[in-house]
Amino acid sequence: MLTARRTAGPATVLDLCCSYGINAALLNHDLTLEDLYAHYTSPQATELTTAELIEWDRAYYAAHRRPDPARVIGLDAAPCAISYAHAVGLLDEGFAENLETMPPSPALRQAVGHTRLITVTGGASFLSPLTFESLLDCVHGPVWVAAFVLRTHSYRRTAECLESYGLSTEKAATRTFPQRRFTSEQEQRYAIDAVTAAGEDPQGRETHGYFHTTLYLSRSAADAAEAPLATLVQAS
């Protein structure tokens, strides 16, 4: 990561709407999403109490820890999810705060000061520019914002907010990313109609039963020139 080279020690990642820390699990551990599916659907997992599962997960993630982990801060409105992710070692720090309704706490403001990457993979449609403004006002130094946004939702207002902080937003045009299956035909019809109204093509994506997201990457013009988005997406 380009930003990691500009800091002493591990880069700090702030994961918005982090839930139980799955992004941190994939980022800092030699594990795939398929590994996590198998882990949490195994007979052993379903038989454990919460306290037992915490101990089991703590050992599991410690055994798969990468030698050069990023420092990950989690932010989510769900205190139980934050508490669990921190207890098993996925989050270095976790905050159960809703910046849509209140300003960041002093502890959160201090924790995110050296953030170099802000991510959101499952909650962009719940966030307004207010959350991003509250966080960027606390960050010292260069930062990237990587958001996987449902194709049913406009990212325009957030991109305009980030622009005011000197971050130019690019849209990954070559691919989309499936998020989850639709829960009903009604939900699928809504998604197809919304994507079509936005001028996008749902064929092969929403028509195949899944919500899809688009990657938006916001950073300085210098960083964008040094590492073109198309190259980053292709490398992934």
Image (cartoon, grey):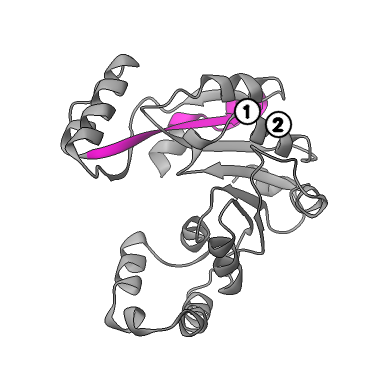
Image check: 93 left or right of 156?
right
Label 1–label 2 contact, CB within 8 A: yes
The quadrant holding residue 70 is bottom right
Q: Which mark is residue 129?
A: 1
The residue singled out by tag 2 in the image is 133
Q: Position of residue 186 (x, y in %)?
A: 21, 33
Badge 2 marks a residue whose secondary structure is helix
Question: 166 or 148: nearer the eye?
Answer: 148
The 10 Å Cα crowd at callout 1, few under 14, some 14 to 19, many 20 or more, is: some
Q: Position of residue 27 (x, y in %)?
A: 51, 58
Asked if the stretch drawn in magenta spans residue 222, the answer is: yes
Q: Residue at x 32, y 84 (%)?
A: 44
Q: Amino acid at mark 2?
A: Glu
Q: Residue at x 48, y 41 (%)?
A: 123
Q: Is residue 205 visible?
A: no
Q: Amino acid at mark 1?
A: Pro
Q: Which mark is residue 82?
A: none
Question: 17 or 80: nearer the eye?
Answer: 80
- Stretch in magenta: 210-230
Q: Residue at x 78, y 38 (%)?
A: 141
Image check: 43 left or right of 106?
left
